[in-house]
Image (cartoon, rainbow, N blue to C red):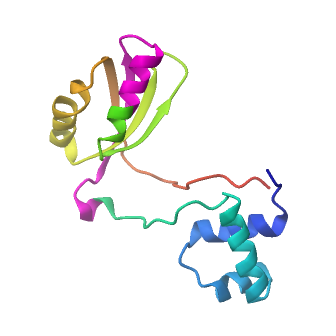
Amino acid sequence: MRKLDQLDKKILRTLQKNGRISNKELAETVGLSATPCWQRVRKLEEDGFIGRCVAMLDAEKVGAPDIVLVELSLEHNDEDVRSAFEKAVHRIPNILEAHTITGDFDYILKVAVSGTRGYQRFLTERLYKIPGVQHTRASFSLKCSKRVQAYVPD
């Protein structure tokens, strides 16, 4: 894997703040002319540093304004149970993220819901129907004060 130089990092940081910036504006921001800037962005995409570009949706307007962080334990932590659980998680659209973790729980899930009733429906209609789920503990996010997709080291 190639190393990023300071110009690549500046491009990535700028795109992370505004993925819809024009190539001309990006080039001006990072101190390049348009063609070399465009070539660098293409190379960053080809090398996998830039993945798919997505729209950041307004959670409130689409009807799922609340985020719940769900810590979850499986009955058995073997490969078959984990694999089946992870496949099931991929089929549930309001699970935004699923992380295997260390500590007292096996996973932490980031789930979009509409209030406590939405969370209760998620538990009974979705999560507790997945075989192997043993125990959960949840925390509602009151406010997100920072959100980035990835950290670009100096």
Left or right: where 101 falls relative to 49: left
82 in the magenta segment: yes
Q: Is residue 97 visible?
A: yes
Query: Depth check: 20 or 154 in front?
Result: 20
Q: Residue at x 80, y 56 (%)?
A: 154
User: Can you tell which quarter of the image residue 13 is in?
Assistant: bottom right
Span of residues in magenta? 60-86
Count of numbered labels shown in the rendering: 0
73 w.r.t. 53: above or below:
above
Q: Residue at x 32, y 22 (%)?
A: 136
Where residue 45 appears, as percent x and y from the top left, is 65, 65
Where residue 50 appears, as percent x and y from the top left, is 63, 62
Where residue 114 appears, as percent x and y from the top left, is 21, 48
Q: Residue at x 21, y 37 (%)?
A: 122
Left or right: where 51 falls relative to 128: right
Q: Is residue 140 visible?
A: no
13 in the magenta segment: no
27 w.r.t. 69: above or below:
below
User: Can you tell which quarter of the image residue 40 is in?
Assistant: bottom right
Where residue 43 appears, as percent x and y from the top left, is 73, 68
Query: Depth check: 44 or 8 in front?
Result: 44
Q: Residue at x 76, y 78 (%)?
A: 30
Left or right: where 63 falls relative to 132: left
- Residue sticking out furthest to the top: 76
